[in-house]
Amino acid sequence: MTDIKKPIDIVQEIGGFRTIEAARQVFKEKMDKENLSKIEKIETTEVLIKIANAIAMCDPDTIFIVTDTEEDNRFVREFSLKKGEEKKLTMEDHTIHYDLREEQGRIIDKTYYITDPEEFISSLANRIDRPDALEYIQNNMKGLMRGHKMFIGFYMRGPVGSPVANPALEITSSAYVGHSAEILYRNAFSVFDKEIERSGHFFTNIHSEGLNRPEDLPHARVFMDRKKQTTYSFLCTYAGNTLLLKKGNHRFVVDRSVYEYRGTQLAEHMFITGIEEPEGRITWFTGAAPSGCGKTTTAMAGDHFIGDDLAQMRIAEDGSIRSINPEKGIFGILEDVNREGDPVLMDCLRKPGTEVIWSNVLIDDNGVPYWTGCGEDIPDKGFTFYGPWEKGMLDKNGNELPISHPNARCTLNASALSNCSERIEDPDGVVIGVITYSGRDSDTMPPIRVAKDSDHGVVIGACLVSEATTAEIGATGVKRAPWANAPFIPGVLGDYMDSQFKFYGNKLIAANKQPVMAGLNYFLTEEARGGSSKKLLGEKRDVKVWLNWLAKLVHRDIDVIKTPIGNIPKFKDLQKIFETKINKEYTIDLYNKQFSLYLDNILKRIDLQVDAYRKGTHIPERIFEIMDEQKEELFKLKDKYGAVVTPYQLEENDK
């Protein structure tokens, strides 16, 4: 990342205030006595100047400072209802929010990094030069909060006191966004100055939805200023585009790990969960998967839940890799969440006692939400994301209209989950024993494979592919999804890859604390293994088996079969875990279908990755060495056994 000296701070350029005296004068002119007394408790000069300039730029009618009190939290919730951004449902503390029909996923085509001359950014991202961004924000965001109330919240992305937690401002005209922030993040108003002094930085997020009209959406933008660690979001409402504490600030943390803490920190699109064995031993996992590919389900399968979306990792003084969740809540995809696969989450969604914001689902006449794949009887009519709905309704193409959007979400506090771990607030984080990578892969990789060393583990993450999901507007088909983090990597992908090799290969990691790195795949189909059905070869609940097998591998309780693409389980071990963990009979026929290597598919997959990475810049040569090594070994297997190699043959070859 090229360091350009003193690039302009756009919000300051538009607001015009550069001194603390000018900032305090703005507060006196724009705030009532109650909120003025709140802001006077914040002492960090840079924070106050940033807020003053956001006020000057957006020009709200009134301002509300959201402190860490239940009274302020309640005001935000009630204002969202009063404003109509949310509506009460029958169950207490449940509300429904509908986004614009045209904006129910990340607006990736309208999301840009603000850049300076000769600055490198990811080839997967859009860029806008700083002067052009200034002009666009000046023309489209200045005065956008007139007629609105501005909410200003002070949050921590991570437990207070954590070495890798990040203080962040959320400035918004949307009470729904403010309400979501209160559920998903830790309001740290009382310690905000102290946390900035400890960490040496803070993020700023400025959002206004404007009049919330479909005709404004073509002009909507999400801008991220890496140099000033500030995001600008306007004329949009979907939380993935507006609550920039989440993926916007995640990008900034990725930047920090790659360019400031390379080799000692990582910021990943990963869950964190713990598997407990009968003797009380807990093995902690982090795992990456693109949105909509089972990350929340996998996280919930653990016995000790910490997070389902983001993880920040560091190498601790004792040589362990430790991880925290920057969030304290869940913004989870609802499609196919049901009692069979997600009993813990379903208890929160269907029983009283949990505050939930629903988005873009069907609400029946009794104020009860339903969604695609919920596994329940669907009412005959109701209201959903495109308006009134009745059974049998068809769209303009003659297709049946779904009851909920594929990217419909639920927002709730993780502490509501019966398996939520108290370690979610541990500033030291948990010691990670397993790293997993998974996507929607219908025909190539086995359900589980383990890297023989950390470099091969990095390659598993680098070679992740997935069917595109509806979390991104306009995305279709099958695509590469490196580390499930590529959309959130601001800089050059090769730099990020180098940071992965340096982190997992760091000699500071103790030999007995090096995590197992594995690829998971829940989406193999019968069709891909000789059948005629597109039905999956496994079930949702099988994930408990894969995680428990990995936990035993960490502690060297089981053996493996070595293959060129990673080590796979032995049948007898899986059979026992299937029986004891989920009371399911596991057959040798299913094992052979799941774990035979279809070499032509794998070789084709490797060629796809090599071709793609050869077009990149700064790509470490190590990845090509490993893939060449894998290809050579795979061709030897093919010469010996043919295009399909069974686990028995793989075990025979390994002797």
Image (cartoon, grey):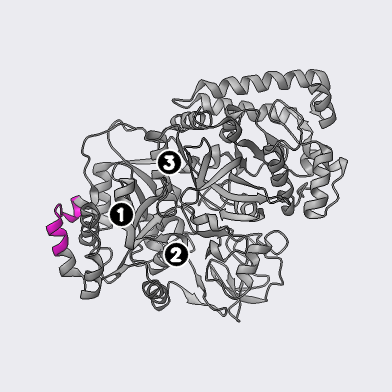
Magenta segment: does it hold 4?
A: no
Mark 2 lies on residue: 180
The crowd level at tag 3 (other Cα within 10 Å; few <14, some 14-19, many 20+) is many
Magenta span: predominant SS is helix
Q: Residue at x 79, y 18 (%)?
A: 639
575 on left or right of 513: right
Residue type, label 2: Ser
Q: Nearer the viewer, mark 1 or mark 2?
A: 1
Sequence-first tag of 3 and 2: 2
Mark 3 lies on residue: 254
Q: Are marks 1 and 2 in contact (CB under 8 Å)?
A: no
Q: Nearer the viewer, residue 303 or 361?
A: 303
- State the extent of the magenta-drawn residues as a range: 13-25
10 on left or right of 438: left
Residue 169, above or below 519:
below
Residue 591, above or below 60:
above
The crowd level at tag 1 (other Cα within 10 Å; few <14, some 14-19, many 20+) is some
Quadrant the N terminus occupies: top left
543 on left or right of 465: right
Instruction: Determine the secondary structure under disc 1.
Output: helix
How far apart are the two marked residues, 1 and 3, measured between alpha carbons? 23 Å
Mark 1 lies on residue: 194
Q: Are marks 1 and 3 in contact (CB under 8 Å)?
A: no
Q: Residue at x 54, y 61 (%)?
A: 414
Sequence-first tag of 1 and 3: 1
Residue type, label 1: Lys
